[in-house]
Image: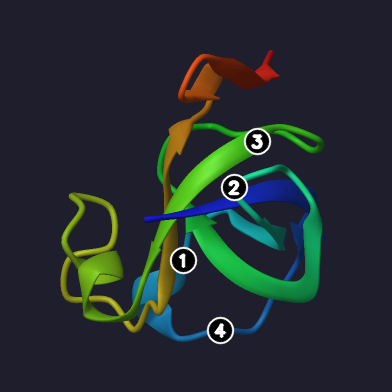
Amino acid sequence: MNLARVAGTVVATQKEASLTGAKLLILERLSERMKPLGDFVVAVDAVGAGEGEVVLYAAGSSARQTTITKERPVDAVIMAIVDSFTIGDETVFRK
């Protein structure tokens, strides 16, 4: 799993039929200290994430393990919205 912030949305009126109805979001990857890594990923949203939210996403073959992405041509899926996380005794992020 990877950390990212939802940076925007993708609208694609013409797409592979199995992707019809899938919500596509642009994610900016983050380090464990919430620093932007400078690259972006397009992911299918399986949990109803919104712009600006911090999320966990899976990539590669793991992205095709959710109910919404099974047997679809997907390389990344958002599977959780992060409320908070700590490293050691330090709270790094809180919603």
**83, above or below 56, in the image:** above
Q: Is residue 68 left or right of residue 70?
A: right
Amino acid on which the number 1 mark rests in the picture: Thr
Q: Quadrant of the C terminus?
A: top right
- Which residue corresponds to mark 2? 32
Give the secondary structure at mark 1: loop
Q: What residue is pinned by disc 3?
A: 54
Residues under labels 3 and 4: Cα distance? 27 Å
Q: In the rendered structure, which amino acid carries the disc numbered 2?
A: Glu
Position of residue 44 relative to residue 67, above or below, is below
Which callout, 3 or 1, points at the residue further toward the start of the chain? 1
Res 43 label: none
Q: Which residue is mark 1?
A: 20
Residue 12 in the image: x percent, y percent?
70, 74
Residue at the spot x=72%, y=46% of the render? Answer: 5
Give residue 60's quadrant in the image. Answer: bottom left
Residue found 79% across the figure and 38% down from its top = 51
The residue positioned 51% from the left and 22% from the top of the image is 86
Q: Provide the secondary structure element on which disc 4 rests.
A: loop
CA gap, disc 3 to disc 1?
Answer: 25 Å
Q: Real-space Cα distance between discs 4 and 2?
A: 34 Å
Q: Nearer the viewer, mark 3 or mark 4?
A: 3
Q: Earlier in the sequence, mark 1 or mark 4?
A: 4
Q: Which residue is mark 4?
A: 15
Among numbered discs 4 and 2, the one appearing first in the sequence: 4
The answer to which of marks 3 and 2 sits earlier in the sequence is 2
Which residue type carries mark 4? Lys
Q: Real-space Cα distance between discs 3 and 2?
A: 12 Å
Q: What amino acid is found at the position of numbered circle 3 in the picture? A: Val
